[in-house]
Image (cartoon, rainbow, N blue to C red):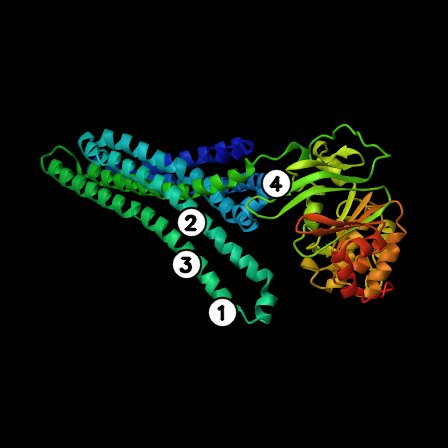
């Protein structure tokens, strides 16, 4: 939680003002029982009605001041905790954006969403409570003890004797609670993962009538989360009852000792009444502290999860905000060159083995292979979402391991296999904050064969492009990649939802983009057969390389795929 407090520094003076108001409110509250004791023991025996009324007005004034100062302080604490949490969420989101693909795989997307939402909420809540009760409760306890010592030291010692035991119990249970709440958060991540999968794939679930099966999956995760929260709740639930029992026993002891002292003439009735008010205030403050410890335990677990992500190292070369490295590009070098690249996914048996090929400037290369053969992995390595275990990848002669993310990725226009559209307008999706002109957007729409259904670039796009068909979404994604006039255009199975006529027209349009180097990843031979160079992948290995004619003679897998898909008709 120390790291969380760092985010309060920008609101330091505002927070100090709120804490000062809280302290003044506590002082005003502490004066009320003292005034009551004076009225009972000193003013009433004089039978001076005016004095009674004046001291009574003093109690009312203290009550009003306590209310005003508390409201002011609470509103300030809400503003401070909100601002601090906003900055923390911003830092967390910034780090998530910069995480490498390996780190995202390790944390998992549902867990990152949970940390961004539930965990930041827990820290936000405890920051607010700390500012409200973190000052008031200690002030009430300390001030109450000091005043009760002046009223009756013997009764004060009876009350104070229970405090060390209360402190030990609270600290011991809270330490245990941090571990339990962390486990509960992890179970929450698992449940969110199932919910996310079901929401995303709800149409498939309904189409296959798998609702009951998914309900059972969710029930299992929900039950585990419930059990984890129940264990944590049971552990922390023991704090309040134990403390209440100890406090009530202390109160009984104080009343018995007080009654004996009044009977013996060692104490006055007004002081005993005031003392009971103070002890109630002190005990309530102690209960508030125990609740604060419970919340602090939850927030500590959440803060640990948040800063686990924020502290995750980000490779400087992948940091989009890193300064540009020295440009050592060679205009005469191939646009892309893989040399003896070997890569293995963590905790996976799949690997790429000794991948070597190059693409000349302005050329088109097709990459063909069955599902799981490694086609998309090549793209992830090229964009440096992952780093190869060995070998090198160069773009225009420069090793990508020596390029910043901004410098590397400005060369590319990419359509991923599972790409998405964002809510907004068509123009906003295509421009994507690149300050493109409407002429550039219109040209990209035309080249992507999207002009037949996009008459107005300002047309609205629903979340994930739900108001477009699969083929229309693919053409809009291709238009987005083309809009920036990239040096290298990468299409990862981006025409799978297109009919053959539209696919042929798209290939024709792309063939006129002579300035762009094109990498077309496909399972459909018609999409890549006219490329200058074709690579055939199988289980992470290159089993064929060359143009269409050469592969028809030398690569049985390519020839078999061609015969199955094309039926001997090269005009498809």
Q: Which mark lies nearer to you, 2 or 4?
A: 4
| Disc 1/disc 2 C-alpha distance (Å) | 25 Å
Return the residue at label 3: 223
Residue 184's disc number:
2
Return the residue at label 4: 99
Return the residue at label 1: 212
Given residues 289 and 64, the one toward you in this image is 289
For label 2, the crowd category at 10 Å Cα-Cα, with few meaning under 14, some 14 to 19 and many 20 or more, is: many
Question: Would you identify the image quadrant in which residue 458 lies?
Answer: bottom right
Given residues 421 and 367, the one toward you in this image is 367
Q: Secondary structure at mark 2?
A: helix
Q: Which mark lies nearer to you, 1 or 2?
A: 1
| Disc 3/disc 2 C-alpha distance (Å) | 11 Å
Given residues 19 and 415, the one toward you in this image is 415
| Disc 4/disc 3 C-alpha distance (Å) | 31 Å
**Does residue 278 appear to the left or right of 518 in the view shown?**
left
Q: Residue at x 65, y 38 (%)?
A: 387
**Does residue 71 appear to the left or right of 198 in the view shown?**
left
For label 1, the crowd category at 10 Å Cα-Cα, with few meaning under 14, some 14 to 19 and many 20 or more, is: few
């Amino acid at each position: 939680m120390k790291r969380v407090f760092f985010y309060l520094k920008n609101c330091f003076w505002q927070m100090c003002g709120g804490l000062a108001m809280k302290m003044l409110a506590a002082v005003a509250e502490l004066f009320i029982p003292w005034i009551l004791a004076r009225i009972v023991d000193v003013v009433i025996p004089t039978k001076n009605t005016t004095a009674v009324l004046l001291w009574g007005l003093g109690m009312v004034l203290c009550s009003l001041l306590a209310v005003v100062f508390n409201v002011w302080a609470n509103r300030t604490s809400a503003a401070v905790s909100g601002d601090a949490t906003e900055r923390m969420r911003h830092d967390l989101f910034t780090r998530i954006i910069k995480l490498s693909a390996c780190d995202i795989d390790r944390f998992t997307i549902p867990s990152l969403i949970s940390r961004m939402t539930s965990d930041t909420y827990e820290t936000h809540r405890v920051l607010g409570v700390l500012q409200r009760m973190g000052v008031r409760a200690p002030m009430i306890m300390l001030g109450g003890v000091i005043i009760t010592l002046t009223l009756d030291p013997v009764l004060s010692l009876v009350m104070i004797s229970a405090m060390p035991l209360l402190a030990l119990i609270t600290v011991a249970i809270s330490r245990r609670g941090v571990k339990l709440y962390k486990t509960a958060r992890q179970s929450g991540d698992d449940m969110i993962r199932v919910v996310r999968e079901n929401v995303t794939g709800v149409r498939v679930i309904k189409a296959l009538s798998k609702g009951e099966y998914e309900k059972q999956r969710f029930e299992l995760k929900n039950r585990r989360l419930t059990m984890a929260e129940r264990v944590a709740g049971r552990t922390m639930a023991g704090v309040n009852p134990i403390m209440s029992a100890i406090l009530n026993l202390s109160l009984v002891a104080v009343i018995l000792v007080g009654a004996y002292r009044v009977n013996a003439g060692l104490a006055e009735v007004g002081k005993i009444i005031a003392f009971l008010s103070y002890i109630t205030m002190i005990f309530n403050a102690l209960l508030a502290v125990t609740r604060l410890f419970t919340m602090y335990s939850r927030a500590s677990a959440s803060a640990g999860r948040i800063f686990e992500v924020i502290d995750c190292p980000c490779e400087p070369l992948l940091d989009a905000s890193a300064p540009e490295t020295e440009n050592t590009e060679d205009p005469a070098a191939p646009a892309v060159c893989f040399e003896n690249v070997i890569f293995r996914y963590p905790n996976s048996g799949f690997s790429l083995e000794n991948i070597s090929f190059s693409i000349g400037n302005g050329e088109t290369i097709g990459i063909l292979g069955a599902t799981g053969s490694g086609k998309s992995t090549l793209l992830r390595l090229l964009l440096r979402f992952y780093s190869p275990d060995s070998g090198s990848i160069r773009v225009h002669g420069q090793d990508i391991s020596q390029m910043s993310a901004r410098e590397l990725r400005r060369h590319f226009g990419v359509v991923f296999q599972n790409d998405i559209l964002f809510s907004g307008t068509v123009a906003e999706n295509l421009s994507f904050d690149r300050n493109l002109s409407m002429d550039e957007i219109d040209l990209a729409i035309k080249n992507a064969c999207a002009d037949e259904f996009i008459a107005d670039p300002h047309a609205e796009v629903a979340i994930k492009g739900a108001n477009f068909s699969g083929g229309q979404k693919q053409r809009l994604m291709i238009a987005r990649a083309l809009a920036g006039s990239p040096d290298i255009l990468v299409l990862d199975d981006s025409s799978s939802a297109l009919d053959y006529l539209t696919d042929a027209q798209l290939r024709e349009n792309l063939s006129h983009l002579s300035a762009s180097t094109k990498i077309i990843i496909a399972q459909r031979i018609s999409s890549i057969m006219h490329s200058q160079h074709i690579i055939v992948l199988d289980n992470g290995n290159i089993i064929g390389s060359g143009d269409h004619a050469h592969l028809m003679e030398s690569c049985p897998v390519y020839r078999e795929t061609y015969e199955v898909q094309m039926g001997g008709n090269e005009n498809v």
